[in-house]
Amino acid sequence: MVFPTFLRIAIMPMHHSMEITTDEKNNISFTGGVEAKLIKILSSKLRFDYQLFIPDDKEWGKFVNDQWTGMVGMVHRNEADIALGDLTISEPRSKAVDFVPYAVETSTFVTKLPKVMLKSASFVMPFQWPVWLTSIFVLIFMPILFKYMMVKKISQKRMYMSMIGSIFNQPFSFNIESGLDRFLMGGWMTYAVLLSTSYTALLLSSLTVPLNENGIRTIKDLATAVSRGNYKCMTNKGSANIDMLNESVSEDLRLIKEYIIETDWFSTENAVIAPTDFEDNVAVLGPKWFFLLEYGESPYSNKYIFKEAVGTGNIGIAINKRFCCKSDLSVALSWIINTGIFRKFFDEEVYKARMNFDKKHYYIEVPSGPKPLSISDLLGPFILFGGGCMLSILIFSFGEIVFNFLQRVSKV
């Protein structure tokens, strides 16, 4: 059977995929995009003209109130011959229309990168709180224990000053002669060296390399945060993502599905564009390839794309079940895929996206190498040192005043 010379094509305008323009007569034409180029080359190879249509509800297609919405609905009702535009193949959709697959898509979540920790608090970053508590406990009780275990009799004050000073690389203020004393103080010196060198190394690392707060980086973490009300999830209206979550064998994903919100990603340009200014406690679900092109990749992005996949599905062209030439379309698509033409279209779009990232939203300046420490990096320790000096002056001044007062009282 001869392939038709004219097709009605339902599309979903998307940034990077199908970029369009509309004239004064509402005629739609392509201006760029990976799948737009796919339609053009199919038109050239199969020798057909076409007219583009956008669903009134701007959805891909789902079964609601006993009827299909979006592009799938248009093809099912014979309002369009074919439809494409990042259209995921699913079992419910396959009952309404036929599909010719041409790509595989992975869906995942994206969140904002956690905020960078304040450098002013860098002096407490090297150790977690259990290590700090353990170290303080050891500093308080070990000098008391050593005073009674050592053969050499040393005052408690001198023992404290010597053992604390050793952590700051200061020598002991007393001589050690007996074997037991050497064993005890040798063990303490080993502990002091390990503690001080570990702290110094980790402090320098935290000052020279930006540290971020602990954020949501896994699906399990996201499910826990969502169930507690600390995070919100959203996805594009009318996509197959909700069905993907509902059919998942993962309890975490099914839990997230109960809280996820569908939002309209259509912009003023009449195209789907991933949200850019969502809040810090929001996770967005969508195609991973779309997020990579929209947000960029680490470290030149302020977004974090999950490594885990929510699901993987085939992307295809939806065809009316009475369409005459499905096999011809399938052969033409196979030729485009196998010759690497479609891959070339995608690589060109990746290059274009990287060259045109909006610096306001997508670029984070990252030093090319080790950076010298600045005053701002050491602000926290300086504040702590200055505060300690001021507190010492106040305590000694107050103590001197009290001491002089007590002396005068005693003479009277």
Image: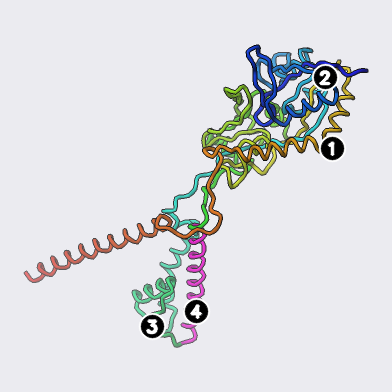
Q: Residue tagged by mark 3?
A: 174
Secondary structure of the residue carrying tag 1 is loop
Q: Of residues 378 and 184, which is closer to you in this image?
A: 378
Of the image marks 3 and 1, the number of the one nearer the N terminus: 3
Asked whether, in this view, residue 30 is left or right of residue 170, the answer is right
Q: Which mark is residue 48?
A: 2
**Which residue corresponds to the image point at 65% horizontal and 18% vertical from the top-left?**
22
Secondary structure of the residue carrying tag 4 is helix
Mark 1 → mark 4, Cα distance in angstroms = 71 Å
Q: Amino acid at mark 4?
A: Gly
Of the image marks 2 and 1, the number of the one nearer the N terminus: 2
Q: Amino acid at mark 2?
A: Phe
Secondary structure of the residue carrying tag 3 is loop
Q: Of residues 50 and 327, which is closer to you in this image?
A: 50
Of the image marks 1 and 4, the number of the one nearer the N terminus: 4
Mark 2 → mark 3, Cα distance in angstroms = 97 Å
Of the image marks 2 and 3, the number of the one nearer the N terminus: 2
Mark 1 or mark 4, whichever is nearer to me: 1
**Which residue corresponds to the image point at 46% horizontal and 64% vertical from the top-left?**
135
Where residue 303 appears, as percent x and y from the top left, is 58, 40
From this viewpoint, which residue is outermost toward the right?
A: 1
Instruction: Kindly indicate whether the residue at mark 1 contacts the one at mark 2 (C-beta within 8 angstroms).
Output: no
Q: Residue tagged by mark 4?
A: 186
Mark 2 → mark 1, Cα distance in angstroms = 21 Å
Specify the segment rendered in magenta. 178-206
Q: Of residues 128 and 110, which is closer to you in this image?
A: 110
Mark 4 → mark 3, Cα distance in angstroms = 14 Å
Where residue 63 appears, as percent x and y from the top left, is 72, 18
Of the image marks 4 and 3, the number of the one nearer the N terminus: 3
Q: Residues within 10 Å of mark 4 (few under 14, many from 20)?
A: few
Q: Which mark is residue 339?
A: 1
